[in-house]
Amino acid sequence: MSTDNFTSEIAQFAGVQQQVQANTNLSTLISATQSSQMTSAIGLIGQTTSATTSTLPLQNSTASVSFNAPAAGPIAIAVSNSTGTVVKTATLNAAAGLNTWTWNGVTDDGTQMSDGQYSVAVQAASGSDSVALDTTVSGKVTGISKTASGIDVNMGASAIDIDDLTGFSGS
C-alpha cells in the first residue's frame, strides 16, 4: 500500500470516529433535553389540559372533545375502544365554530365503559361528502412519562405526546 493511500484511509477512519462521537454527544443532548422537559412538565400534574389529538381519555366516567365545525349542521361522532371497535356514536347539530361534546362512558348498547384510553373521530357533512374535523380533548394530568419518541402526558390511562398540548387550566 502506498503512503498516500494509507494516509487517506487514516483520514477516513478519523472522520468516521468523529461522526460516531458526534452522534453519541447528540444522543446525550437529546436525553438531557427530555429530562429537562420532564422536570418542567411535572408542574402539569393535577392540571386540566387540552391537546389536539384523537386520543380520548375517559376519566371518572367523563370525556370531553371539542371541534370547529366549518358551518352549522349535522356532525357525526364515533368513539372506539383499544381494538378499534366503535362503542359509541352520536349525531348532533353543531353550530358554526367551536363546539364541545361530552361522553359519559356509556356505549350505544347501554354498557358503562371503564376509564381508559379511547379514540374519537368527528365528521361534518359537506354537501354529499363528509369532512373529518380535528379534535381537541381535555383531561386531568395524572403523570408524565418518557418514551423512545419523547415525553408523554398521562391523562389517566391515556398517553398524549407533550407536543400535542394546546393549553391548561387550574385543577
Image (spheres, rainbow, N blue to C red):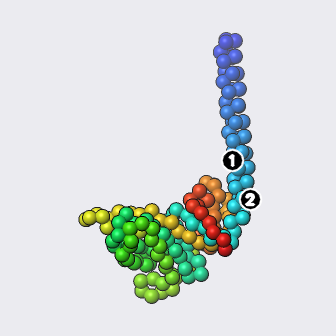
Q: For marks 1 and 2, give the one nearer the viewer.
A: 2
Residue farthest to the bottom?
Answer: 110
Please tell me how crowded label 1 is: few (under 14), some (14-19), or many (20+) other residues with Cα within 10 Å. few
Residue extending farthest left: 128
Question: Dot 2: few (<14), some (14–19), or many (≥20) neighbours within 10 Å?
Answer: few
Mark 2: amino acid: Thr
Of the pair 54 and 4, the residue shown nearer to us = 54
What residue do we see at 48% from left, 86% from top?
A: 111
Q: Which mark is residue 30?
A: 1
Give me the residue at 33% from left, 71% from top. 73
Mark 1 and mark 2 in contact? Answer it, CB < 8 Å. Answer: no
Q: Considering the numbered disc 1 on the image, is that residue within a helix, a strand or a loop?
A: helix
Picture quarter with the N terminus? top right
Residue 70 in picture, x, y percent from top left: 37, 63
Mark 1: which amino acid?
Answer: Ile
Residue drawn 45% across the image and 68% down it: 98
Residue visible at 49% across and 71% down in the picture: 65
Query: Residue 22 at x, y = what percent?
Result: 70, 36
Front one among 37 and 119:
37
